[in-house]
């Protein structure tokens, strides 16, 4: 018979064991490491880690719009090198677009491509028109002032420019570096799971000054998780479209 758990419905896991797993997750241990330390079945640990990541997504999507000095940039995730492929998004790399509010948070979104129409739609849905936008010289950012934004400054990496008079995208590039280093420890993330892992990186970056364990515990105490309603394959198929919804 399932015992009462204030944090997780429909489970036989005790509250003490749940808190232990959550603490290990917040300490950024892998599921294999947490399984060994907690003495749980690996499938159970993986299931809980997936639920934790899904809750991070729910919390992250509440944050908008972005204001003040804002940096935008795109990056590509996947194999470091694919034989015979060169250039932007070479091979099977996944394009990801990012927005960073200086001194604050970052928002990431998987995109089909980095065209002007794609990037403008996300920026217009996430960034306040009063913001001062910093970007590199990619043509996908052309026309932001004409679209109504107060200012748009470019740093041209192709001319060996990286920072000039306060114009730079060092913040969002620092986030890309943090995310890729962190994901490397998993020795490859399945494409179906990549959206959750990416948003977890975003969440950890945005709350890097907070006690992540206390923050997550408060969330699941207020709104318990459920083993019978967690993410399934359908969740992953609609994930990209769901994240592209504008803030209301």
Image: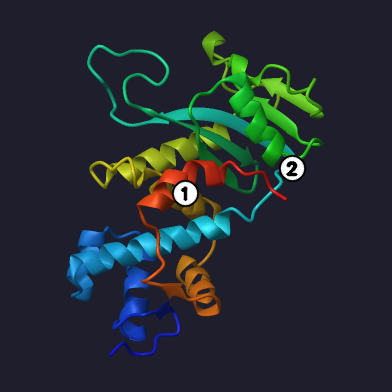
Measured as percent of width and height from the top left, residue 91 is found at: 32, 20
- Give the quadrant of the N terminus: bottom left
Return the mark for residue 67: 2
Tag 2 secondary structure: loop
Tag 1 secondary structure: helix
Using the image as rendered, state which of residue 243 and residue 152 is in the foreground: 243
- Look at the image and tell me whether residue 38 can be seen: yes
From what the image shows, is residue 178 above or below residue 224?
above
**Position of 239 compared to 149: left or right?**
left
Q: Residue at x 66, y 31 (%)?
A: 121
Q: Is the residue marked by circle 1 packed among few (<14), some (14-19), or many (20+) residues within 10 Å?
A: many
How many discs appear?
2
From what the image shows, is residue 229 above or below residue 112?
below
Q: Residue furthest front?
A: 234
Q: Residue at x 51, y 79 (%)?
A: 221
Which of the marked residues, 2 or 1, is nearer the chain's N terminus?
A: 2
Measured as percent of width and height from the top left, residue 151 is found at: 78, 26
Tag nearer the camera, 2 or 1 = 1
Using the image as rendered, state which of residue 228 and residue 197 is in the foreground: 228
Q: Is the residue marked by circle 2 packed among few (<14), some (14-19), or many (20+) residues within 10 Å?
A: some
Q: Residue at x 50, y 67 (%)?
A: 211
**Label 2 close to label 1 by CB (< 8 Å):** no
Return the mark for residue 199: 1
């Amino acid at each position: 018979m399932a015992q009462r758990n204030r944090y997780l419905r429909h489970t036989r896991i005790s509250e003490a064991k749940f808190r232990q797993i959550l603490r290990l997750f917040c300490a950024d241990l892998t599921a294999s490491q947490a399984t060994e330390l907690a003495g749980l079945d690996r499938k159970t640990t993986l299931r809980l880690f997936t639920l934790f990541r899904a809750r991070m997504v729910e919390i992250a999507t509440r944050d908008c719009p972005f204001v003040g000095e804002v940096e935008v940039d795109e990056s590509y995730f996947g194999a470091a090198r694919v034989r015979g492929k060169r250039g932007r998004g070479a091979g099977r790399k996944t394009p990801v677009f990012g927005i960073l509010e200086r001194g604050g948070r970052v928002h990431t979104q998987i995109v089909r491509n980095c065209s002007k129409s794609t990037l403008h739609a996300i920026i217009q849905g996430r960034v306040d028109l009063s913001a001062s936008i910093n970007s590199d010289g990619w043509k996908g950012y052309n026309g932001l002032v004409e679209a109504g934004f107060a200012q748009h400054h470019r740093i041209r990496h192709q001319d060996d420019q990286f920072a000039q008079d306060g114009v730079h995208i060092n913040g969002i590039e620092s986030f890309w570096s943090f995310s890729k280093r962190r994901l490397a420890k998993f020795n490859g993330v399945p494409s179906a799971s990549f959206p959750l892992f990416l948003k977890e990186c975003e969440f950890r970056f945005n709350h890097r000054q907070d006690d992540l364990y206390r923050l997550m515990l408060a969330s699941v105490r207020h709104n318990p998780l459920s083993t019978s309603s967690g993410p399934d394959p359908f969740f992953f198929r609609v994930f990209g479209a769901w994240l592209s919804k504008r803030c209301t």
